[in-house]
Image (tube, grey):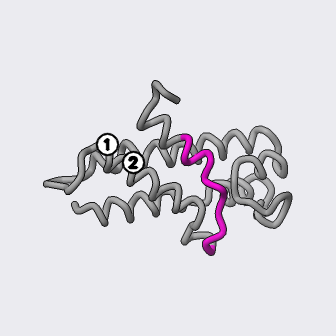
Amino acid sequence: MNLALLLVISYLLGAIPTSVIVGKIARGIDVREHGSGNAGATNTWRVLGWKAGMIVLVLDAGKGVAAATLVPLTHFGHLPFTAPVIAILCGLAAVIGHVFPVYAGFRGGKGVATGAGMLIAIAPIPV
């Protein structure tokens, strides 16, 4: 698997609009049409309450963790970078996917939770 495919998979993983999905399930609303208009955990917390906000926070952070740890494990063959660099690139692709999700009209969140998940996966001791 080449690096471009790993980055596309990471982007698509990060682009899953968890706050929109949770909003539709919890109250049948799009959280981007309420509160700050942002598709992130903080706006979900404000609009739907702390339980829904925590669910979105964990799912968004999980996207960063999965992109930085699981996606790089799927490669076969030689890649042009070392494993930590590939993990960082895949994590950043997930953050970009969260901020500009193809599934939600490129209107996403700010990427804070997804980026935090990536950092926790890549460098758990400093974080």
Which picture quadrant has residue 10? bottom left
Give me the residue at 38% from left, 54% from top.
89
Please tell me whether residue 80 is drawn above or below residue 105 in the rendered image.
Answer: above
What label does residue 88 carry, if any? 2
Distance from the alpha carbon under mark 2 to that under mark 1: 6 Å
Query: How would you rate the neighbour count of disc 1 (Cα within 10 Å): few for under 14, some for 14-19, many for 20 or more?
Result: some
Query: How would you rate the neighbour count of disc 2 (Cα within 10 Å): few for under 14, some for 14-19, many for 20 or more?
Result: many
63 or 28, nearer to the observer:
63
Q: Is residue 109 magenta?
A: yes
Q: Are marks 2 and 1 in contact (CB under 8 Å)?
A: yes
Give me the residue at 81% from left, 66% from top.
33
Please tell me whether residue 49 is drawn above or below residue 80 in the rendered image.
Answer: above
4 or 17, nearer to the observer:
4
In the displayed structure image, the side of residue 16 where residue 123 appears, left or right: left
Number of residue marks: 2
Q: Which residue lies under the disc numbered 1?
A: 84
* Secondary structure of the residue carrying numbered label 1: helix
Give the residue type that dot 1 points to.
Answer: Pro
* Secondary structure of the residue carrying numbered label 2: helix
**Where's residue 56, x and y in %?**
66, 46
Residue that lies at the very extreme toward the top in this rendered image:
125
In the displayed structure image, the side of residue 75 where residue 33 appears, left or right: right
Q: Is residue 36 magenta?
A: no
Report the magenta residues as a range.
105-116
Give the residue type that dot 2 points to.
Answer: Ile
Give me the residue at 43% from left, 45% from top.
66
Give me the residue at 52% from left, 62% from top.
97
